Amino acid sequence: MSLLPPLGTAGTSMLENYATVLIFVLVGIAFAGLALGVAKLLRPRNPNYAKMTTYECGELPVGTSWVRFNVRFYLVALFFLIFDVEVIFLYPWAVVFKHLFPVPGLGALVFWEMVIFLGILSTGLAYIWVKGDLNWVKKLIERPDSGFAVDDEDAVAAGAAEEEVSTQ
């Protein structure tokens, strides 16, 4: 007689379910620790100057690694991740939808739920597109009191600073 229930069956209590998850987490941590420990014991240790330098596509690194990046890089990366992760939800939906479409009422419900989901995504994409956050180069604003053109974000910050000075 086996101590474990057959695969695909639920345990008799919630405590058994949590115990199963705990066992899987502990086995995963032990396996990762064992793999890293064995790799540390077996790998060769012969560091030299060439191996310790930063690899930059065959070029020697120049300057410091602490470089300020424009915030637009982060915004575009964040937008990409948001839409990329949400598009991943389309694949399981398509697999399930194939089987649920023939069911009366349920297929239409699942279809319209996805239409609403895609509508929300499209609205978000249209919003960041109209706002100009997908443009690499933003338009410059000409300030009337000086001959300098500044970014949209800088103009807002400068306007707020000018208001503070004028009120004092």
Image: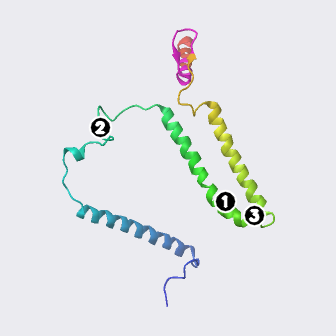
Q: Residues within 10 Å of mark 1 (few under 14, many from 20)?
A: few
At 54% from the left and 14% from the top, the residue drawn is 162
Q: Is residue 157 magenta?
A: yes
Of labels 2 and 3, earlier in sequence is 2
At 57% from the left and 48% from the top, the residue drawn is 84
Are the residues at dot 3 and dot 1 in contact (C-beta closer than 8 Å)? Answer: no
Q: Residue furthest bottom?
A: 1
Whole-number angstrom distance, CA of label 2 to CA of label 3:
56 Å
Q: Which element is circle 2 on?
A: loop
Residue behind mark 2: 59
Amino acid marked by disc 3:
Phe
Of labels 3 and 1, earlier in sequence is 1
Say left or right for 12 vs 120: left
Q: Which element is circle 1 on?
A: helix
Q: From the image, which quarter does the C terminus lie in?
A: top right
Q: Quadrant of residue 28?
A: bottom left
In percent of width and height, residue 24 lies at 45, 70
Q: Which of the pair 30/69 is nearer the observer? A: 69
At 56% from the left and 78% from the top, the residue drawn is 11
In percent of width and height, residue 80 lies at 55, 43
Residue behind mark 3: 101
Q: Quadrant of residue 14?
A: bottom right
Whole-number angstrom distance, CA of label 3 to CA of label 1:
10 Å
Whole-number angstrom distance, CA of label 1 to CA of label 2:
46 Å
Q: Residues within 10 Å of mark 3 (few under 14, many from 20)?
A: some
Q: Residues within 10 Å of mark 2 (few under 14, many from 20)?
A: few
Q: Is residue 64 magenta?
A: no
Mark drawn on residue 94: 1
Figure check: 35 above or below 135? below
In percent of width and height, residue 82 lies at 57, 46
In percent of width and height, residue 112 lies at 75, 54
Q: Which of the pair 49/127 is nearer the observer? A: 49
